[in-house]
Structures are given as C-alpha cells and as structure tokens.
Image (cartoon, rainbow, N blue to C red):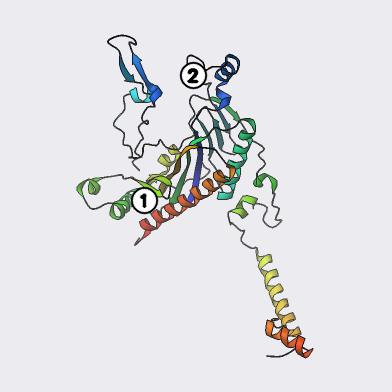
C-alpha cells in the first residue's frame, strides 16, 4: 500500500492562550473574567509548498498535514519537530482528542467496473441493491483497545482520487483501492507529553498500514 | 467510491442560546454552523459522534512559503552514494535500497571468491567453546 497523506490533529479542551490575549489581559488586570465571552482570534495556517506540508494552529486545535510521506520515520520526525517548535512558543492546553488520519492506495490491475464487481462479491451479500450498484464504498468503526478507528474504503479512479487529496502527488494510479483510516482517541483533559504523541503517531500508522493491507489482501483473494 | 459525508457534530452547550431573553416568550434554541443551513442532500454519519481528524482551521489567516528548515533527521543526514546519486536518506529509511550495478555485482563476486580462497588456504574453522577449552587444557589447537 502506498501512503498518500497523513493528518495529525491535537484537539484541545481549552483554547490556546495565543488566541485569547484580551481575556487573559482582562483577567490579569481586572482580577475577574470578562463579562462577555470574546470570540477567539482567527487561527493560523501555513502551507509549505515544496514539502507539501500544512501546519494549522487555531484556538481549539493544532494540526499537521503531510502530503508527501515517503516513510513512517519521516512522518514521526516531522510531526514531532513541528509540535516541539509550537510548544516552545505556547503551552499546548490539555487534550480532548488525538487523531491521525491517513490515506492509502493500492493500484489495481482491474478496470473500475471490474474492481466494483470485486468489491460487491467480497464485501457484500448478493442482495438487489448491491447487485445493481455501479459504485460502492464501505465504512466501518473499529476499536483497538482504548483507540477507535473510522475506516472508509472503496474503488476510485484517478480524478476522484485527485479530488480527495490536498496536494497532487507526481503520479496517481488510474484505478485503485482507496483506504481512509482515522485512528483516534478521546482524552479527558490530558496533558500532552512528547512520548505519548510519538507513540500515538507510530501506532496510528502501524494500525492503518495493517488494516489497509488486510483490506487489499481480502480483495485480491481468488483474483 | 461513494463517500459518506459526516454531519457536523452536536453543538456544545455554549451554542444553546436564549431567544427573547427575560421574557415570558423566551425559549432556548440551538445554533448550528453555516454548513448545516446550506441546502444539502442527506448525509450519512457514523454512530461515532467524534468529528473526523482534520486540518481545517476555523477561518484561519493563510500564509505560504516555499520551504522550511526543520531540524529533522532528513535534513541532518545527507546520503551520498556515487553509484546511486538519486538515493536519499528517506529512501534508505523506507527500506528502498538501490539495485546493485553490474560493476558492484562483479566486485561482490570477486570479493566472495577471494574470501573463499583465503578460507581454504588458512583452514579457518569456527572457534567454538569446545575448541577453546581444549586449546587451554592442552595448550594447542585441538581438532574435532
């Protein structure tokens, strides 16, 4: 399976201090909370075109988008470096959710219609609606210990594949199986620790890679 | 592939507001984000209420640069293989080793052949514990 893109998102339980300066100043000087809640300042989004990377820091979440992931080490390395840099500037508030979403593709030797037929045979029972369908997709919610994973997969042709990607890779297969794995964990106001983030990014990619391989091998059985 | 879309998640408590506050007619209503009010077809959603992992910020200020100097391993380690100039550190990290050239294969073959000749000439045998003990006890190299 080829890894096309990865998003690592930290969702915070409180807004980042960087975006609430008026409330903080008011609290500091007046000794009480602002009588009316102010809308936080707008977030920040930086696109690094050559690296096909995007960094988003806004009041409620901090995210890194990698549109080019040559390997797992590259992903972990970049994610950790960026979060370390952001943490140097501002203390990240406790987490409410930690998520890693990855897109995987496996080129198919079949044409699109044949691949759809293969899905119908392997994934669905031969009921009317499945038999008559000209396109299919599947969605499953899986649990792995305290983690959850939303897995979506289906056949895609290159134009559709291109439309779901933020940065177009140099080469895309004409027909492929597309797998979208959103691996996440909900937290109760948990402080962010570097080790925790590193382990999460590693295990998220391992899990997604394993599930994607299972899906593809299921589809390839008997072909 | 048919892509199920996710409905915006349940609004938080702070989105519950009062209409006509302090009046007998007052009632609570829930604010939804703009997306919900747009005419859209029915969207499927999973039983999991957590909204998906995303990098979409809330109306962020956008900036763009060409490149960034991140102190990552990729940046620190530069690989230079004269026979394979196209190979990068990330290729090696991903386990993508270059295919050996014909010269390399030939050199490898020659090295193996030379090693075999040296081995035969010197009669090198593995130094096992039993041989070592025998050597110490008898003060000479033993034979199996």
Residue B106 locus on image (x, y percent): 68, 70
Residue on which disc 2 sits: A39
Image quadrant holding the C terminus of chain B, namely bottom right
Q: Is residue B88 visible?
A: no
Image quadrant holding the N terminus of chain B, namely top left
Q: Is residue A119 visible?
A: yes
Mark 2 or mark 1: whose residue is earlier in sequence: 2
* Mark 2–mark 1 CB contact (< 8 Å): no
Q: Residue at x 43, y 37 (%)?
A: A163
Q: How many marks?
A: 2
Residue A96 locus on image (x, y percent): 47, 36
Q: Residue at x 53, y 46 (%)?
A: A201
Residue B85 locus on image (x, y percent): 68, 52
Left or right: residue B141 compared with residue A128:
right
Left or right: residue B78 compared with residue A162:
right
Q: Nearer the viewer, residue B138 or A54?
A: B138
Q: Residue at x 62, y 38 (%)?
A: A84
Quarter of the view holding residue A122? bottom left
Q: Residue placed farthest to the right in the image? A: B139
Crowd rating for badge 2 (residues with CA inside 10 Å; few <14, some 14–19, many 20+): few
CA separation in Å, label 2 and label 1: 51 Å
Q: Does dot 1 land on a helix, a strand or a loop?
A: loop
Numbered disc 2: what chain?
A
Q: Residue placed farthest to the top in the image? A: B23
Residue A204 locus on image (x, y percent): 49, 48
Residue on which disc 1 sits: A111
Q: Of discs 2 and 1, which sits in the foreground?
A: 2
Are the numbered discs 2 and 1 placed on the same chain, yes or no? yes
Q: Nearer the viewer, residue A16 or B92?
A: A16
């Amino acid at each position: 399976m080829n890894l096309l893109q990865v998003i690592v998102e930290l969702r915070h339980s409180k807004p980042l201090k960087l975006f609430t300066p008026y409330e903080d100043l008011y609290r500091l000087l007046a000794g009480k909370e602002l009588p009316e809640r102010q809308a936080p300042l707008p977030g920040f989004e930086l696109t690094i075109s050559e690296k096909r990377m995007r960094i988003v820091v806004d009041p409620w979440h901090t995210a890194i988008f990698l549109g080019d992931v040559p390997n797992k080490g590259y992903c972990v390395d970049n994610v950790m470096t960026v979060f370390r840099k952001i943490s140097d500037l501002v203390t990240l508030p406790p987490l409410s959710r930690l998520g890693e979403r990855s897109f995987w593709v496996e080129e198919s030797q079949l044409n699109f219609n044949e691949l759809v037929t293969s899905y119908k045979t392997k994934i669905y029972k031969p009921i009317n609606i499945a038999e008559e369908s000209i396109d299919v997709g599947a969605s499953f919610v899986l649990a792995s210990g305290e983690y959850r994973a939303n897995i979506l997969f289906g056949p895609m042709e290159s134009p559709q594949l291109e439309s779901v990607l933020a940065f177009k890779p140099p080469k895309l297969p004409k027909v492929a199986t597309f797998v979208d794995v959103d691996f996440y964990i909900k937290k109760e106001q948990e402080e962010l620790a570097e080790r925790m983030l590193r382990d999460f990014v590693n295990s998220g990619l391992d899990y997604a890679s394993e599930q994607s391989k299972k899906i593809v091998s299921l589809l390839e059985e008997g072909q | 592939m048919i892509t199920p879309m996710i409905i915006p998640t349940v609004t938080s408590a702070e989105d519950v507001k009062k209409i006509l506050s302090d009046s007998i007619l007052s009632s609570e209503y829930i604010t939804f984000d703009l997306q919900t009010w747009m005419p859209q077809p029915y969207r499927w959603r999973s039983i999991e209420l957590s909204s998906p992992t995303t990098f979409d910020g809330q109306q962020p200020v956008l900036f763009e640069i060409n490149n960034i100097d991140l102190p990552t391993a990729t940046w620190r380690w530069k690989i230079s293989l004269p026979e394979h100039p196209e190979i990068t550190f990330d290729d090696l990290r991903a386990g993508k080793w270059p295919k050996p050239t014909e010269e390399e294969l030939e050199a490898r073959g020659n090295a193996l052949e030379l090693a075999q000749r040296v081995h035969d000439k010197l009669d090198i045998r593995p130094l096992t514990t039993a041989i070592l003990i025998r050597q110490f006890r008898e003060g000479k190299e033993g034979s199996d």
